[in-house]
Amino acid sequence: MCRLVYEKIPIVETARRCGLVLDSRTLRRLEVEASCPFCGDHGPGKYHLSLNTSTDQYRCNLCGTHGNSVSLYARIKGMSNKEAFRELSRETKSYPFPQQPEPQKTERQPLPLEQRHAAYSDMLEHLTLLGRHRENLIGRGLSMERIHQNQYRSMPETDRSRRLLAELLRACGHELLGLPGFRTYYGEWSISGPTGFLIPVRNQDGLIQGLKIRLDGADSPNRKYRWLSSRGLPNGTRSYSWIHVTGNTASKRAFITEGPLKGDTASFLAHDALFVCVGGVNAIHGLKDTLVDLGVREVVEAMDMDQMTNENVRRAVLAMRREVQSIPGIKYSKYTWNPAYKGIDDYLLSRRAAQM
């Protein structure tokens, strides 16, 4: 009995062969955007044609034309689908069409902490810090020694380097299934995420729980940071908003602020003061347990000054305050500074500059 074998022809590779103009900013996304060759997108620099790298389908969100890799090539080249398939199969790397996996009843959970720490530690050893990212960190007031100590690294910027990183980690014996940020792409392991620099998020024992990315060229000041996650991608894993601990963990006084990089910077500028950092004003899960495990007796709130003008932020901060104040024996206070400086790190940096 003859069994029909289907082949998977990558839509992005086909689009390149057709001469389509791709939006380079979307090349690592599930949906790559391109200029539509059929309607012209109503002007240069427009990208209304969506290329789905999972299904290898295309669709123009403006004129509605749609199809797959074969029909795209056939229509642009003026040939039949059969002729297009033969030409693409002959000159394009094709892949066995994967069978639909059984739907997951629950999301894949991250590997145990010790495995994540070991894999991420080796990963950071294989990466470097680009000059523009180093200058950003120095501009925040961090020393070169502290930058090295905190292990900030730049995300790989090419598909090849991302696949190589995954291969190196696998060669070192690390499991990537269950490691947030890693996913498969046509059967090959790679790391997913925007360009920028990585910030290790550690627990009170210094173990790396996860990584956050400080994005390059973020348009909105509220969207500068993103967790390294591969949620929703093939063989990908979600990330959680882990609590970050930095500074002198023997201290009985802890400052609470938002964001691991802000905490790292403020701790350094405050002579290694203990900072416990939430991932966002609403991301307080685990905060109470962390403070209890640290054994602190005094908590100082050092959240951003936008709570003075943003009602949603103020409500979230009040909820966090009630959570912490419910810990028996905790002395709670609020640290205030000149509201011209949004964050505690900005204020401490200005104070150091005034003292020089």
Image (tube, rainbow, N blue to C red):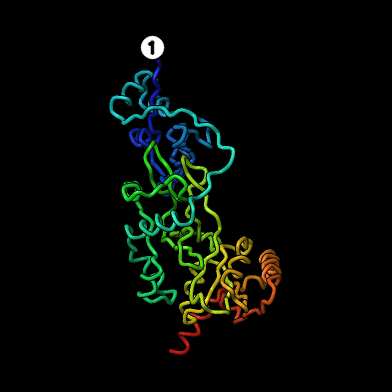
Which quarter of the rendering shows the C terminus?
bottom left
Read off the residue under disc 1.
2
Left or right of residue 14, residue 116 in this image: right
Task: Give whichever of 92, 114 is nearer the camera.
Answer: 114
- Asked which secondary structure carries label 1, the reply is loop
The residue that appears at 38% across and 27% down in the rendered structure is 96
Residue 189: name its quadrant: top left
Question: What's the amino acid at mark 1?
Answer: Cys
Q: Position of residue 81 (x, y in %)?
A: 39, 20
Q: Position of residue 36 (x, y in %)?
A: 45, 36
The residue that appears at 31% across and 31% down in the rendered structure is 93
Above or below for 166 versus 344: above
Q: Position of residue 215 (x, y in %)?
A: 45, 59
* Residue 161 in view in this figure: no
Left or right of residue 310, residue 195 in this image: left
Query: Pointer 1: residues within 10 angstroms few (<14), some, or many (20+)?
Result: few
The residue that appears at 63% across and 66% down in the rendered structure is 288
Residue 291: name its quadrant: bottom right
Q: Position of residue 272 (x, y in %)?
A: 47, 79
The residue that appears at 36% across and 68% down in the rendered structure is 134
* Residue 120 in view in this figure: yes
Task: Give whichever of 75, 244 is nearer the camera.
Answer: 244
Left or right of residue 180, residue 131 in this image: left
